[in-house]
Image: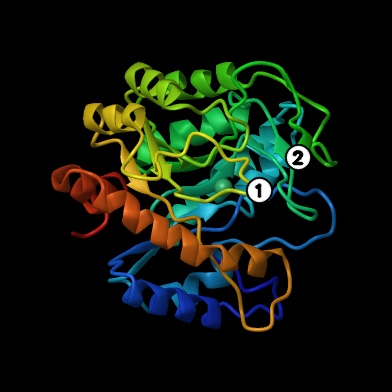
Amino acid sequence: MHPFGGFSPNADYRSPVDELLDTMKGNNMSRAIVMPTPQGESGNRGSWDIEDFIDVIRRHPDRLAFMGGGGSLNKMIHAESPDGKVSDDLKARFRKRAEDILAKGAIGFGEMSILHISLLPGHVYESVGGDHPLLLLLADIAAERGVPIDMHFDLVAEDIKTPEWLEQPPNPPEMKRNLNGFERLLTHNRKAVIVWAHAGSDNIGHWTAAMTRDMLRKHPNLYMSLRLNIGRGGHVQNNPLAPEGLKPQWMEVFREFPDRFVIGGDQFFAPPGNRGLVSKFAKAGAAIRKRTNVFLSRLPPDIARKIAYENAIRIYKLKP
Ligand SMILES: [Zn+2]
């Protein structure tokens, strides 16, 4: 969940978090994990991270938990060292910040990014290797501390010309295969739990059910959070929902790996009057929630219970 209240000093995190809590009440959601979006701009645009919402979130310990780093650790990667060259000083600052995030009560690191494609004007484009030294370091810290990492990774399984609807800058005209770097991150430290975000709403088309199955078979420390999005302009492929029931190839994956999926709503909440990109994303929330309920209702009840509840409690170490 991304309740975005703006950049300090005028930020208002209270109203988006209140709206999140209301939404939870009305939709049978018992817990939510709040995290900043993966930010990586090097310019003057502000950033937001746990310090912006921590006071508001801490008032609801039975409902809300949080992860951090999207507005700080992710910027050290994408804005400070996009070429993968990392000084000892940056490494030390990165570790210190990661430890500070956990000391403040975060249950893990998120939302981090490897490739983040820009879907709309003003939406960020970020790209580094999955085996960027700071991502490897983060995997080590996460493993040491027993906390998960939430990772935004738009998968490019083979070199392609950028699909027409994504062709506008800041996206590049071509996209290079990025799977190897991600797999090196996964094999780097098997004790690091990595939750690959937004399964089931793939904007490129390479994150198929078969790819999902292969990756889960190869990488025991890999988990996925499902975003049951409609997608923009019918471009999203590889969604598990079929007009009636679930697509059989996805159903097979859920049966083989019922313990490896959680629901990742990717829901945005904005303060009243917000006219920015966040309010656009916030408007998509209701449809995602509706489709999530349809999805869960079409799973066998024991698998639905795992994906909707039990897996998240275990992976994120939430109180049952
Ligand atoms: Zn994301």
Residue identifier under label 1: 233
Q: Nearer the viewer, mark 2 or mark 1?
A: 1
C-alpha gap between disc 2 and disc 1: 9 Å
Residue identifier under label 2: 165
- Is 134 or 35 nearer to us in this picture? 35
Residue 299 x, y percent position in the rendering: 23, 44
- Is 285 or 63 nearer to us in this picture? 285
The secondary element bearing badge 1 is classed as loop
Q: Quadrant of residue 29?
A: bottom left
- Is 291 or 85 nearer to us in this picture? 291
Q: Quadrant of residue 220?
A: top left
Q: Residue at x 48, y 66 (%)?
A: 286
Q: Amino acid at mark 1?
A: Gly
- Is 139 or 178 nearer to us in this picture? 178
Residue 272 vertical placement versus 296 (above, below): below
Of the two numbered discs 2 and 1 on the same chain, state the one appearing first in sequence. Answer: 2
Residue 13 x, y percent position in the rendering: 56, 77
The secondary element bearing badge 2 is classed as helix
